[in-house]
Image (cartoon, rainbow, N blue to C red):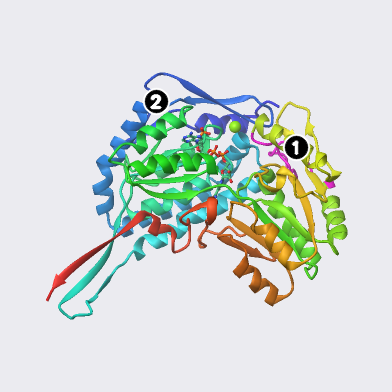
Amino acid sequence: MSLNQNEQALLDSVKDGLYIAGAWEPSSSGATIEVNDPSSGDVIKVIADGTVEDSIRALDAAVAVQDDWAATAPRERSNILRRAFDLLQERKEEFALLMTLEMGKPIAEARGEVAYGGEFLRWFSEEAVRISGQYGSNPEGTGNMLVSQMPVGPCYFVTPWNFPLAMATRKIAPALAAGCTVVIKPAGLTPLTTIFFAQLLEDAGLPAGVVNVITTSKSGAMSNALLSDPRLRKLSFTGSTPVGVKLLEQAAQGVLRTSMELGGNAPFIVFEDADMDRAVEGVMAAKFRNIGQACTAANRIIVHESVADEFAARVTEKVNAMKIGRGTEEGVSIGPLVDDAAVEGSARLVADAIDTGAELLTGGSAIEGPGSYFQPTVLDKLSPQAAILREEIFGPVLGIIRFSSEEEAVQIANNTEYGLVSYVFTENIHRGHRMIEQLQTGMMGLNVGVVSNAAAPFGGVKQSGLGREGGAEGIHEFLSTKYTLLPR
Ligand code: NAP
Ligand code: MG
């Protein structure tokens, strides 16, 4: 499907260069990267393929203005973030369409991401003016102890393709609020939204060099160079656990502060006393939002055997009613997956589930191109051997495993190295409280299928990560505590 005039005009308004020290420039090697539309496979934009040298120049720029930025009045930093929030509201249709074009998500969900991603700008514009410390006598009465908060310093951000705007604002907004400068490297599959957001920051009055954007096809080499530069003070990464582990190893060499938002394998437990309407609605959101490509996606649907037939039938009916198509078409809820490798991943997990004894209730196949489409799929009666129970699916595949006791449900839910989010459906408040205590995840939805909010601390335990983004916690990822003793 070719681009319409409106889409082409939007893409033409997006810069194609690296953003370093407030200037847009080509790669020093002249190399370029093609960005494509996963609904057609067509190239929609060609942008700069930055080199390692370009990334060092971006860090030079961030380092050069770090002290000045840290010294700006908190109110000034707050005002810039607030202006960025306001500009994003004015440009929300452009941002939504751009995300749908480069990543494939349905336009209604892209609008939802603009709303969610924007809230980090508003939230941290409010937090910027509330950074405070402590002052008080030591226990001995011989001196006063002053505790203050200082910006960590220049930061390097690496973000994934699945939420191109929100994963950028969730890091950039608290960093700016705290007084840190930034080099950000968006995912190679979806660089345009971050570029367009840098244009917005420029329009909001952000001084040159405070945020620098580097796009590259050589993310490993670039990250390695930046992480071994002694001027860098912090790494914040969102992406898969294996890449996160590699970056943590490199960050350890420089003893960098790190925030890591890694993979998930969310359990979604439906107890026999659940409100079935809520549970069905919850699983549709938790599983199929972003075409299943979310770190918070329900990955293992753990349903009590006495309600599993009804639950499976109702979910299958809803899935059969979902409209598949290009994300720009109104009413579509299943757009293309991000690329053909993602389609192959879903196909492999479905085949393995069926081979190990699962029943296929609907879907199950890739859809012939153009575009990277996979049918929304429901599998029931997964065997404990199914790979789908251990791996992140990252596609529109819903697999049900049945249980008979609360103990067994908890055991299945915790049987993973991941610990990002869990979802529990029960009308029994005591059971709900037991689940809060027993499930090993950083976040939980109790009778709800979507938990993300800029005002909440987002993050995981176990191999799902380190640190929290958003909430009162978010800004502390970018502050370091300084203690001073003043003798009496
Ligand atoms: P990914 O392959 O780990 O990529 C994430 C980022 O890391 C991209 O910018 C990528 O750039 C870069 N990267 C890849 N290999 C690298 C290397 N060797 N060295 C340095 N950088 C490297 O993950 P993804 O497939 O984009 O995203 C999906 C994953 O993100 C899932 O595991 C999902 O659960 C996780 N996620 C987590 C959260 C959370 O908050 N916990 C939120 C969203 C997504 P290139 O692609 O350009 O190489
Ligand atoms: Mg793309």
Mark 1: which amino acid? Gly
Between 415 and 99, the one lying in front of the other is 415
Percent position of residue 273, x then y:
79, 71
Q: Residue at left 76%, top 64%? A: 278
Q: Quick check: 35 above or below 202?
A: above
State the residue position of label 2.
Answer: 51
Q: What residue occupies the far left of the structure in this picture? A: 488
Q: Residue at left 73%, top 42%? A: 334
Residue 460 visible within the image: no
Report the quarter where the C terminus lies. bottom left
Question: Element under label 1?
Answer: loop
Question: Element under label 2?
Answer: loop
Locate residue 137: give its quadrant: bottom left
State left or right for residue 60 relative to residue 32: left
Between 167 and 308, the one lying in front of the other is 308
Mark 2: which amino acid? Thr
Q: What residue occupies the far top of the structure in this picture? A: 30
State the residue position of label 1.
Answer: 325
Q: Say whether residue 72 is magenta.
A: no
State left or right for residue 419 relative to residue 246: right
State left or right for residue 163 relative to residue 133: right
Crowding near pointer 1: few (<14 within 10 Å), some, many (20+)? many
Q: Which residues are magenta?
A: 320-338
Percent position of residue 457, x then y:
50, 61
Locate residue 413: give its quadrant: bottom right
